[in-house]
Image (cartoon, grey):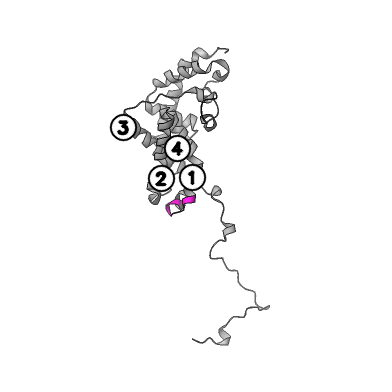
């Protein structure tokens, strides 16, 4: 096919200003780094085969999920296995993922379901929290969550970090938590240790927001009497 000369646009014409053209795609320089992506976008990208997006999600959530698992089972090796199960579930469900809720809600829902299955499978009850991990405990759990559970008991008079010996307090709170029903304990962990909103907790546990608040409140109330003996201790 031959083109007529008059149909060929001039390459340079000072009398004609070219129209603004939208680029077909962003240049590499314009694509933000994965660290700037939202969790939801990372998961969607992973569902499309972007493995680097999954690596970024692991970096963001590995410690948080492990911390949650460890607080619930108080066993380092079991917590590691359950954490791996959570990320394997992400892999298996990546192609079916739709961001209908916050990604944090999505991943903690998976973690909660895995905890429930673990307890049912092994008929295991956790040994509950050990406060030694807030007082320079083993490995790096200290780095996962800073602060003392005493700060979360909704009572300004509690200051266990300054008032008692580590082992004695640890035993006291373990005894207190043994008396808290699992559904209250889980809501307490999600709220006070992982600092999730009540809305997120309600979505994760599939309960009304008011119920989530009630469970946390009842857990806190159950803890206070068992720790009152340390109120005036000057250790």
Q: Work out how far the residue at label 3 is from the one at label 1, CA to CA, in angstroms.
A: 28 Å
Q: Work out how far the residue at label 3 is from the one at label 2, CA to CA, in angstroms.
A: 21 Å
Secondary element under disc 2, as helix, strand or loop, is: helix
Mark 3 or mark 2: name the one nearer the start of the chain: 2
**Residue at screen point 31% across, 32% down:** 121
Quarter of the figure with residue 76: top left
Q: Which residues are magenta?
A: 46-52
Contact, mark 1 vs mark 2 (Cβ under 8 Å):
yes
Mark 1 or mark 4: name the one nearer the start of the chain: 1
Secondary element under disc 4, as helix, strand or loop, is: helix
Q: Work out how far the residue at label 4 is from the one at label 2, CA to CA, in angstroms.
A: 18 Å
Vertical comparison of 79 with 223: above or below: below
Q: Nearer the viewer, residue 28 or 189?
A: 28
Does residue 60 appear anywhere in the picture? yes
Circle 4 crowding by C-alpha within 10 Å: few under 14, some 14–19, many from 20: many
Residue 161 image point, x, y percent: 56, 20
Tag 2 residue: 90
Tag 3 residue: 121
Secondary element under disc 3, as helix, strand or loop, is: helix
Residue 204 image point, x, y percent: 41, 37
Secondary element under disc 1, as helix, strand or loop, is: helix
Circle 1 crowding by C-alpha within 10 Å: few under 14, some 14–19, many from 20: many
**Residue at screen point 48% across, 36% down:** 64
**Tag in front: 1 or 4:** 1
Contact, mark 3 vs mark 2 (Cβ under 8 Å):
no
Circle 2 crowding by C-alpha within 10 Å: few under 14, some 14–19, many from 20: many
**Tag in front: 4 or 3:** 3
Tag 4 residue: 200
Tag 1 residue: 57
Mark 3 or mark 1: name the one nearer the start of the chain: 1
């Amino acid at each position: 096919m031959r083109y007529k000369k008059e149909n060929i646009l001039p390459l340079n014409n000072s009398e004609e200003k070219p129209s603004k053209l939208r680029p077909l795609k962003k240049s590499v320089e314009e694509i933000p780094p994965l660290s700037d992506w939202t969790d939801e976008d990372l998961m969607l990208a992973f569902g499309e085969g972007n493995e680097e997006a999954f690596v970024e999600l692991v970096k963001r959530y590995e410690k948080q999920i492990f911390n949650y698992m460890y607080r619930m089972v108080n066993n380092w090796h079991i917590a590691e296995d359950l954490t791996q199960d959570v990320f394997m579930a992400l892999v298996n469900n990546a192609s079916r993922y739709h961001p209908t809720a916050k990604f944090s809600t999505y991943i903690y829902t998976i973690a909660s379901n895995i905890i429930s299955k673990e307890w049912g499978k092994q008929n295991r009850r956790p040994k509950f929290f050990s406060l030694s991990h807030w007082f320079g405990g083993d490995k790096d759990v200290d780095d996962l969550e800073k602060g003392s559970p005493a700060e979360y008991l909704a009572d300004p008079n509690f200051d266990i970090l300054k008032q008692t010996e580590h082992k004695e307090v640890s035993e006291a709170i373990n005894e207190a938590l043994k008396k808290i029903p699992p559904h209250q304990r889980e809501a307490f962990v999600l709220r006070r240790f992982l600092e999730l909103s009540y809305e997120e907790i309600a979505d994760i546990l599939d309960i009304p927001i008011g119920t989530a608040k009630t469970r946390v409140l009842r857990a806190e109330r159950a803890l206070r009497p068992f720790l009152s003996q340390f109120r005036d201790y000057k250790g």
